[in-house]
Amino acid sequence: MDFWGEIVGQTEAVRVLRHAADPGGAPAHAWLITGPPGSGRSNLAFRFAAALIARTEHERGAVFEQVRSRTHPDLGVLTTQKLLIDIRAARDIVTTAHYAPAEGRYRVIVIEDADRMPERTSNVLLKALEEPPERTIWILCAPSEADLLPTIRSRARSLRLVTPATDDIARLLHERDGIDVDAAGRAARLAQSHIGMARRLATDPDALARRDSTVRIALGIATLGDAMRGAAALVRVAEADAAALTEVLDAREREEAMRSLGLAPGAAIPPQMRAQIRTLEEDQKRRATRSLRDGIDRILTDLLSLYRDVLLTSLAVAQRDSSPEREVGDPELVNLEHADAIAELGARWRPARALAAVSAVEVARERLGRGITPGLVLEALFASALVAGETVGARP
């Protein structure tokens, strides 16, 4: 497969980066890759990093394997398991920016989730971008340019990614991962073109079951009591999802840490080494907290897709009622497996009520971003949808 072959639906971005990484080129010293969740920002950033580091095109595959595992000496990565990137971590990575490349053409520093940098942390990075070392290249990833300070945006070349087509993601899952065509198509549709989530839904039956449970719980909410119980149930779904994501990773990290300290798995930890293990455990706890909030955010994405389906169905019903002679087709649903329940709800709800539910999800996402307890966020979401129903009412 072509080195850039796993980058789905980003033809123009690949063209630009392929040219920039050409051995005879002169790439900008800083890049800002933006795009919606699941568009492949991080994957593209690390591909670009490997192409910049490799001395020849022939080396790119081997270099990428080291880059992907974060083991290449010419790669620096700034990311966080917390809600925000710590200023001390930013200072540390800025210090390494002045190191000369050890093996490759450039030293490359990737900042994942650059939107998680508060202003003080951003200012540390800004100083490094104002006076960049000759052979160091920065690659920042964020959902949008607006998520970063204008002074940082002005010092980086921007590259905007688009939402990949569902068919392109399904094709990638089939060709790269050997997933059945129908299963790949279903996963791409349910993931709403989020590449990583599509792969997970296609390969993890438990993840697929948890998503289905989310939609069923939301469809069953008719009273305030249902809303409270549904919110609690969805928090448990998010907790199970977060635990599944972190359990294997935590165990692998602990095993690697023990091995790096010269200890056998399960061996007693000498007192002088306990601080290092304790630091690892604290990092894992912070990741668990973030994973739970990310899990709630994924649930909100799934709820948004559900209420979007209901809204489109309700609009179709309204069009048929207002123009009986006009042929109105059925909307394309994300949650096709629940088409009957969505059709029933769309027939009962007015479009204004469905739109209010969609808006309630957006408000919930903003509240989650402000650090409000996930259970309260979901309770308020469902309560708002019920209040909207009482205000707008059902169809006569």
Image (cartoon, helix red, strand yellow):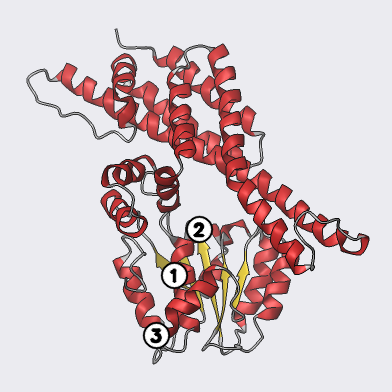
Q: Which residue is mark 2?
A: 146
Amino acid marked by disc 2: Ala
Q: Is residue 245 left or right of residue 331?
A: right
Is 120 situated left or right of 102 in this image? right
Three-letter amino acid code at disc 3?
Answer: His
Instruction: State the residue in front, 159 or 7.
Output: 7
At 30% from the left and 31% from the top, the residue drawn is: 336
The quadrant where residue 258 appears? bottom right
Q: Earlier in the sequence, mark 3 or mark 2?
A: 3
Residue 332 visible in image: yes
Which residue position holds label 3? 58
Task: Give the CA distance from mark 3 to mark 1.
Answer: 28 Å
178, above or below 77, in the image:
above
Image x and y of residue 386, in percent: 48, 17
Q: Position of residue 58 (x, y in %)?
A: 39, 85
> Can you give x and y, in whole percent of width and height, for residue 88 in the image?
75, 66
Identity of the residue drawn at 49% across and 17% down: 387
Name the residue carrying label 1. Answer: 158
> Distance of mark 2 from mark 1, alpha carbons?
12 Å
Which residue occupies the foreground of this view, 257 or 117?
A: 257
The disc, 3 or 1, on the residue closer to the chain's N-terminal end is 3
